[in-house]
Amino acid sequence: MHIHILGICGTFMGGLAALAREAGHTVTGCDAGVYPPMSDQLRALGIELIEGFDASQMALKPDVFVIGNVVSRARKPDGTPKFPLMEAILDAGAPYTSGPQWLAEHVLQGRHVLAVAGTHGKTTTTSMLAWILESAGLEPGFLVGGVPVNFGVSARLGGGTAQGFAQVKEEPAQRAGDTEQKPAPSRRHPLFVIEADEYDTAFFDKRSKFVHYRPRTAILNNLEFDHADIFDDLAAIERQFHHLVRTVASTGRVVVNGLEESLTRVLHAGCWSEVRSFGSAVCDFTAEGEPGHFDVLERGVRVATVDWPLGGVHNQLNALAAIAAAEHVGVSPAIAAQALGSFQNVKRRMEVRGTVNGITVYDDFAHHPTAIRTTLDGLRRQVGPNARILAVFEPRSNTMKLGTMKAQLPGSLIDADLAFCHSGGLDWDARAALTPMGERAQVADSIDALVAQVTAAALPGDHILCMSNGGFGGVHARLLQSLQNK
């Protein structure tokens, strides 16, 4: 079929476009300010990109329009539609659907879906799990909200060959009162690993994206309040997570972080599948040792050792989740741990962008206070207590722009020696929010001013960690250039 994607340059929609093209469909798309790296990836695939959302695109006459959640019925100040193409689609009664629904119907059907949900770590854990399955020879398909370095692409269809199937003996969940466990027959499923986002599906479908995926293996990595632009409180997000749990088959597996009270509440609302927990001392899967080198224990028995270049307790927990999920499709913890030894992380996850005059500049996607705190903790463990860390960040996500979590920022920056905040576009006072940090924090309302502040403060041996879920105005390259000229 011919599909035309509105909002094609987003990480999810761009990945969907790549999958559709690989499957043999004709794919075109549009976005505002068509931008790299996704625009470059899509053009390399031969996908035509159109700038803007003009109604003239109706002339393409695709079989279906696939609508990204950037699209809305919003109006400009002069009363004209912000997305005239969407208005034309509705007026014409043309067929349209959401990205997650199209993916579910045309890619995920008939596959064993392994979905990775959570407030933090989805992209990294999805990438870990896909690499584990790839290393085990299972050729999984995947869709990741980033670019795993091991693969170099954010999405692929994966195995339709014998190697692309897992031979899985699926055990039905034990029921209260059952005296014996009846074995279920083995089945063959092509595997697909997907980052399962709790953000809403589209302007016409306000359910979380992940309810469309129908996973047989679901990771619930963590859960706290986020997306204040669409969720009123934590309970509202917990409700969506429980909707996901409801879609997992009785022969499926839910892998849950045992350290999270919010996830305990989700499962207490009802769970009909096998549950495997990780994290705490009483969980099924636990870690013993430092994040860079640790033993994996399954119900108290050492089953594997992970030795890898990643740091941070959050990545240790991500690894446990991926190991527990991989076991459900027949990959032993020992094989999974060996694969993690060659895992190269994801672009923009503690990615070293360069070193100048002994000063190292990193790029990271962290934007929520918890992600900022765990990322800084990981870097602190890596560089030791004496090296200086300069945290450079912008509160860019919708939640952070609202100022909902501004009070948490000083605490999230505790491992930074100095903090530099880009306050451009904020409606709240970043200086006031960072007052508890005293002279350790500086605020700038432009990238130029921010670069000047950081450059003036940086010393040989420093580690500059830039954190944003956007392009951050190219601050990494500008910092490296400025440091070179210092």
Image (cartoon, grey):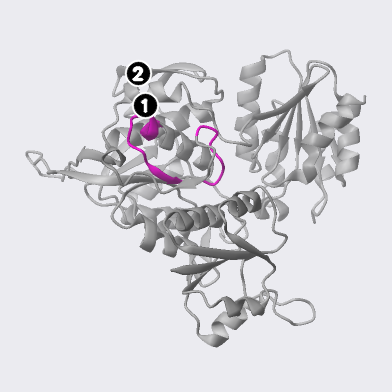
Is 244 situated left or right of 74 in this image?
left
Q: Position of residue 250 (x, y in %)?
A: 22, 50
- Mark 2 and mark 1 lie on one chain; the one further toward the N terminus is 2
Q: Is residue 370 magenta?
A: no
Measuring 81% from the left and 45% from the top, which residue is drawn there?
430
Indicate the quadrant containing the N terminus: top left, top right, bottom left or bottom right. bottom left
389 relative to 67, above or below:
above
Task: Give residue 36's mark.
Answer: none
Q: Mark 2 = which residue?
A: 304
Is 96 situated left or right of 168 in this image?
right
Q: Position of residue 468 (x, y in %)?
A: 70, 42
The stretch of residues the image draws in magenta is 132-150
Q: What secondary structure is the stretch in magenta mostly built from?
A: loop
Task: Give residue 336's mark.
Answer: 1
Q: Is residue 149 magenta?
A: yes
* Residue 4 shows in the view: yes
Evaluate if marks 2 and 1 touch, with contact meaning CB atoms under 8 Å apart.
Answer: yes
Q: Residues within 10 Å of mark 2 (few under 14, many from 20)?
A: many
* Residue 281 shows in the view: no
Between residues 346 and 415, which one lies in front from this camera angle? 346
Indicate the quadrant containing the C terminus: top left, top right, bottom left or bottom right. top right
Measuring 43% from the left and 55% from the top, which residue is drawn there?
210
